[in-house]
Image: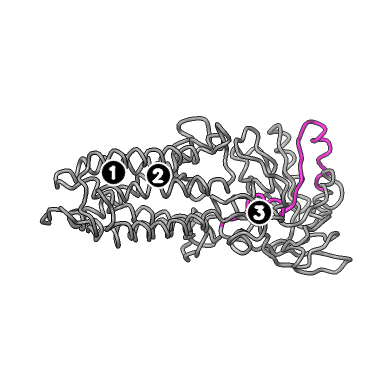
Amino acid sequence: MQQVLVFLPFHADFLDPRGLPIYGFGVMLLLTLVVTAMVWGPPRGKLVGVPDGKMLDLGIVLFATGIAGARVLYMIQYRDQYGPGPLDFVAQFFEFRKGGIVVYGAVVGGLLGYAAFYRLVLRRFKISGWKLADAVAPLIATGLAIGRIGCYLNGCCWGQPVCAECQPVPLSATLGEFPLLTAHAREQVCLPPREGSRMPQIHGLQTSTGFSAAPRLPVGTGDQRTLVTGVEPGSAALRAGLRSGDRITHVNGQLNATIVEFSGDPALVAAAKPRLLETRGVALPFSPDDANGTFHRVGFDEPEDARVGVLRLKDLRDAGLLVYSRDRLTDLVEHWPRGESQLTLGVVRDGVPTTITFTPRTVSFFPTQLYETVSMALLVVLLLAFQPLRRHDGQMMVLLMLGYSAHRFLNEALRIEPTYALDLTLSQWISLAIFAAGMLLEAYLRLTMPRLPAGLTPLSEGVTPHAG
């Protein structure tokens, strides 16, 4: 998993302070477009009479409409994760870097794009639609193979956790563990379930960092910095040397500051802030979760300063001011920056400071993204081998429909998705529909399409060349 491949050294207020991030998922999508539409697409199109340049145009149209369809279907399937209004839907449509596309949505979007492009552009060249379908079938499988590498780099579309009793399974021991703090799976394996979510719940498998912490003391009492109470057996934290009883004093090179949050009546808030600043507090930006800016935040380098500052708010708290506390480690873990995976902790153990560096990793998941990449690469080989043996035009597209739907139905059984009727996921039901459609299409083409000569039949059989 490599969500961010590199940070380019461009700096601006609206960019990540580390530079301009180049996302692995986006790179794989771009590579898909280059390989299928720019490199391999034109010679495949030329076999069936597509004029120069039109195959690239078709590839761009299919790419754009496919991505749009994939995103829309995801947002429909997981509508509980998005705002209720149409404006929320439009605004969140473009948040691709957070993950969230469904391949079968790309099928629908691609078909609509193909229909429009064929009607507006290709029809006047008298190109056989079924020959063109055979030409693009290996391109589609290639795009799926490359695109799923992007899913793997992004850490989305993961499979179920691998139980200890069924290990080892193919690729899971080395490729099925993701950097935990950036993994999309963290919400399911670590965080409490979201109310109203349709996703299957697998919470409680691990913590977000590989260790547990003591409950936070009442605000205004004692040291609010994280105290380690347990380290997960076999975790990266344990191998790095973290132990129960360690007090975390630094995180990623910064003091593990105590953060005091307060909210309530504006007059009480206005009175509280200067008192905290007078006890060596530093005003902090609003929390990323606090879009309305109702929670004000002040940080303290020294735990004692935070305790004294909160004590000075007693009269305001009695009047209704709400006060909470946390530390920088908790804040950082909750809003972990994309592209980072390593955690460096400064701890004090028996009065002795030490530094511990490790990368928390998830439990092993079935790497279903890579299973699809392998499966689609094999399907490309099968399609090319079958090409001269087909009995009628359109049969390669039928083979793609049957092959992908069969693979996806089985691969989906290894994933964690909402289920519907008969305990099947939405993608499994769509797989069954596409498999049935492929069988019906084959029967229709056998009845309506001319039978090709026995033996090896080139894809260009019967094609009339077009100039320009």
Q: Residue drawn at (28%, 44%), measured in percent from left and top?
A: 114
Front of the two marks 2 and 3: 3
249 lies left or right of 182 = right
Stretch of the chain drawn in magenta = 309-338
Label 3: which secondary element = loop
- Identify residue for label 1: 114
Camera-side residue of 35 and 403: 403
In magenta segment, residue 151: no
Residue 80 occupies quadrant: top right
Q: Residue drawn at (19%, 57%), measured in percent from left and top?
A: 52
Q: Residue furthest front?
A: 454
111 lies left or right of 144 = left
- Identify residue for label 3: 162
User: Disc 2, disc 3: CB below 8 Å?
Assistant: no
Label 2: which secondary element = helix
Q: Earlier in the sequence, mark 2 or mark 1?
A: 2
Residue 161 location (% of width, % of height)? 65, 51
Q: Residue drawn at (83%, 50%), measured in percent from left and top?
A: 214
Camera-side residue of 430 and 74: 430
Residue 346 location (% of width, % of height)? 76, 65
Front of the two marks 1 and 3: 3
Q: Marks 2/1: CA distance? A: 12 Å
455 lies left or right of 340 = left
Q: Which mark is residue 38?
A: none
- Identify residue for label 2: 106
Q: Where does the C terminus fall, quadrant-wise?
A: bottom left
